[in-house]
Amino acid sequence: MIRYVMMLACCMGSAALHAEQYPRPSPQDETATERLLRVQSSGAQASRHLQVQTARERDQSMQRWLDTYKYEIPDFYRWTKMTERNN
Protein backbone atom coordinates (compact mmCIF):
# COMPACT_ATOMS: atom_id res chain seq x y z
CA MET A 1 0.00 0.00 0.00
CA ILE A 2 2.80 2.39 0.88
CA ARG A 3 4.33 1.62 -2.52
CA TYR A 4 1.23 2.87 -4.29
CA VAL A 5 1.09 6.02 -2.21
CA MET A 6 4.76 6.72 -3.01
CA MET A 7 4.15 6.14 -6.73
CA LEU A 8 1.15 8.46 -6.64
CA ALA A 9 3.18 11.13 -4.86
CA CYS A 10 5.94 10.86 -7.48
CA CYS A 11 3.45 11.14 -10.32
CA MET A 12 1.80 14.17 -8.76
CA GLY A 13 5.19 15.79 -8.27
CA SER A 14 6.22 15.24 -11.87
CA ALA A 15 2.86 16.58 -13.09
CA ALA A 16 3.32 19.73 -11.01
CA LEU A 17 6.86 20.15 -12.35
CA HIS A 18 5.59 19.73 -15.91
CA ALA A 19 2.89 22.36 -15.31
CA GLU A 20 5.51 24.82 -14.09
CA GLN A 21 7.72 24.25 -17.14
CA TYR A 22 4.91 24.56 -19.67
CA PRO A 23 2.37 27.08 -18.42
CA ARG A 24 -1.02 27.30 -20.06
CA PRO A 25 -1.40 30.36 -22.32
CA SER A 26 -3.58 33.09 -20.89
CA PRO A 27 -6.51 34.50 -22.90
CA GLN A 28 -4.41 37.60 -23.62
CA ASP A 29 -1.80 35.42 -25.35
CA GLU A 30 -4.30 33.98 -27.84
CA THR A 31 -3.66 34.62 -31.50
CA ALA A 32 -6.36 35.95 -33.79
CA THR A 33 -6.78 32.49 -35.29
CA GLU A 34 -7.29 30.90 -31.89
CA ARG A 35 -9.89 33.54 -30.97
CA LEU A 36 -11.77 32.97 -34.23
CA LEU A 37 -11.73 29.19 -33.76
CA ARG A 38 -13.02 29.58 -30.19
CA VAL A 39 -15.87 31.85 -31.33
CA GLN A 40 -16.69 29.49 -34.20
CA SER A 41 -16.80 26.39 -32.00
CA SER A 42 -18.92 28.10 -29.34
CA GLY A 43 -21.52 29.28 -31.86
CA ALA A 44 -21.69 32.66 -30.11
CA GLN A 45 -21.79 34.57 -33.40
CA ALA A 46 -23.99 32.15 -35.31
CA SER A 47 -26.75 33.52 -37.49
CA ARG A 48 -30.31 33.19 -36.25
CA HIS A 49 -31.55 32.79 -39.81
CA LEU A 50 -31.44 29.32 -41.30
CA GLN A 51 -29.22 29.32 -44.38
CA VAL A 52 -30.59 27.05 -47.07
CA GLN A 53 -29.50 26.18 -50.58
CA THR A 54 -31.71 25.75 -53.56
CA ALA A 55 -31.56 22.48 -55.45
CA ARG A 56 -29.66 24.23 -58.24
CA GLU A 57 -27.04 25.58 -55.83
CA ARG A 58 -26.56 22.12 -54.31
CA ASP A 59 -26.13 20.60 -57.77
CA GLN A 60 -23.59 23.26 -58.76
CA SER A 61 -21.53 22.78 -55.61
CA MET A 62 -21.60 19.00 -56.04
CA GLN A 63 -20.51 19.38 -59.67
CA ARG A 64 -17.60 21.64 -58.66
CA TRP A 65 -16.50 19.01 -56.16
CA LEU A 66 -16.77 16.22 -58.74
CA ASP A 67 -14.84 18.29 -61.30
CA THR A 68 -11.82 18.34 -59.00
CA TYR A 69 -11.34 14.64 -59.80
CA LYS A 70 -11.13 15.16 -63.58
CA TYR A 71 -7.46 16.11 -63.63
CA GLU A 72 -4.79 13.44 -63.75
CA ILE A 73 -2.19 13.34 -61.04
CA PRO A 74 1.17 13.69 -62.81
CA ASP A 75 3.93 11.12 -62.28
CA PHE A 76 6.24 13.89 -61.15
CA TYR A 77 6.11 17.63 -60.76
CA ARG A 78 8.40 20.03 -62.55
CA TRP A 79 9.76 22.52 -60.10
CA THR A 80 11.12 25.87 -61.22
CA LYS A 81 12.49 28.64 -59.10
CA MET A 82 10.23 31.68 -58.96
CA THR A 83 11.87 34.98 -59.86
CA GLU A 84 10.59 38.44 -60.64
CA ARG A 85 10.76 37.74 -64.38
CA ASN A 86 8.76 34.52 -64.48
CA ASN A 87 6.33 35.45 -61.74
Image (cartoon, rainbow, N blue to C red):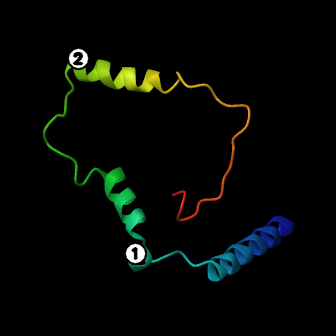
Query: Which quadrant: the N terminus?
Result: bottom right
In the structure shown, which secondary structural element does the residue marked by tag 1 occupy? helix
Write the residue at 78% across / 74% down.
10
Instruction: Give 62 or 85, whichever is nearer the viewer.
Output: 85
Number of numbered discs? 2
Write the residue at 42% across / 72% down.
30
Amino acid identity at mark 2:
Ala
Res. 55 mark:
2
Q: For the view shown, which residue lies furthest in the right direction?
A: 3
Q: CA distance from mark 2 to mark 1?
A: 43 Å
N-term-proximal mark, 2 vs 1: 1
Answer with left or right where residue 45 lies relative to residue 61: left
Instruction: Give 34 or 79, whichever is nearer the viewer.
Output: 79
Answer with left or right where residue 67 lies relative to residue 13: left
Residue designated by label 1? 27
Q: Looking at the picture, how far across and down is residue 35, in whole percent?
A: 36, 65
Q: Looking at the picture, how far across and down is residue 53, in whole percent?
A: 21, 26
Q: For the view shown, which residue lies furthest in the front direction?
A: 85
Q: Residues within 10 Å of mark 2 (few under 14, many from 20)?
A: few
Q: Quadrant of residue 31?
A: bottom left
